[in-house]
Amino acid sequence: MAQLSIKQRQAGDVTVLDLSGKITIGEGSVQLREAVRGLLDDGKKKILLNLGDVNYVDSSGIGELVSSYTTTNNQGGQLKLLNLTKKIQDLLMITKLLTVFETHDHEETAVESFK
Amino acid sequence: MTETIELSIDSKLEFVDMVGSVTKSMTAKLGFSEDDASWIELAVHEAVINAITHGNRSADDKQVDVRFVIEQNVLTIYVRDRGEGFDPSALPDPLDPNNLLNPNGRGIFYMRTFMDEVEYSIHPEGGSIVRLTKQKQSSD
């Protein structure tokens, strides 16, 4: 079974990736990287990562979130995070990354924020 | 009374979850809180990943040894690689504003945040060892 499941859907012009499982070194991180690069290649530059069902992230997974964020920004896009679990929030907070990412608890306001 | 469990894995990422399972059993045995247990599991995961990727440079014929020691209410984990060793003080500070967007360099920081002690040494027969220690709080 895949480490990370990624489902893609549209909410207006915002692409939501619903992530479920683990974002860790190896498969999970690579899947996330490929999904985000794929969206950018298709010209989809408003990306919302829904992390509500991500139950485990390691430093490599956090690094991949950072990488996805910078790659998207460099291509003139925006990448935001939705539904952080307490654990992911803690990992981002202690490494000061909550100051970098825009995060949301509600999908509607998150989608609205891209306009 | 001291209790010890030791396992040795090839440098393959697919084996890291097995170390995680043993870590879970050890934290449960000591009765750590759910939060502490998951942070200890992450710290051990990071140490083993570092041993595989940096220490052994992913050469899968090189072993990583993981030893768990329970003594009273303290869990100590030793992770040994077969690498050349390194100077942890030379690592860039992940909290430096210039490094915030660096995708790498947070593993050891997380280990130091979640464990009481993180200490590096050189094994007399080669390779480096990281020792991670966590004491169970009386309120856990």
Image (cartoon, rainbow, N blue to C red):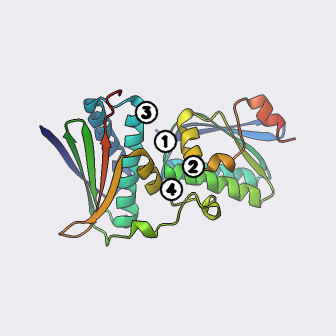
What residue is rendered at 69% in x and 57% in y? A70
Q: Are marks 2 and 1 on the same chain?
A: yes
Q: Chain of mark 3?
A: B
- Vertical relation: B137 (above or below) A96: above
* Marks 1 & 3, CB-CB < 8 Å contact: no
Disc 4 marks which residue? B106
Q: Secondary structure at mark 1?
A: loop
Where is residue A47 shown, x and y percent of the image?
74, 45
Q: Chain of mark 1?
A: A
The crowding category of the residue bearing disc 4, from other C-alpha atoms within 10 Å (few below 14, some 14 to 19, many at least 20), is many
Q: Is B68 positioned to the left or the right of B138 in the image?
A: left
What residue is rendered at 58% in x and 59% in y? B103
Is A51 in front, or is B105? B105
- Estimate the spatial distance between the alpha carbons at disc 2 and disc 1, rounded to whole Å: 9 Å
- Judged by depth in the image, the label closer to the viewer, 1 or 3, is 3
Q: Earlier in the sequence, mark 2 or mark 1?
A: 1
Where is residue B13 shown, x and y percent of the image?
38, 53
Disc 2 marks which residue? A31
Disc 1 marks which residue? A3
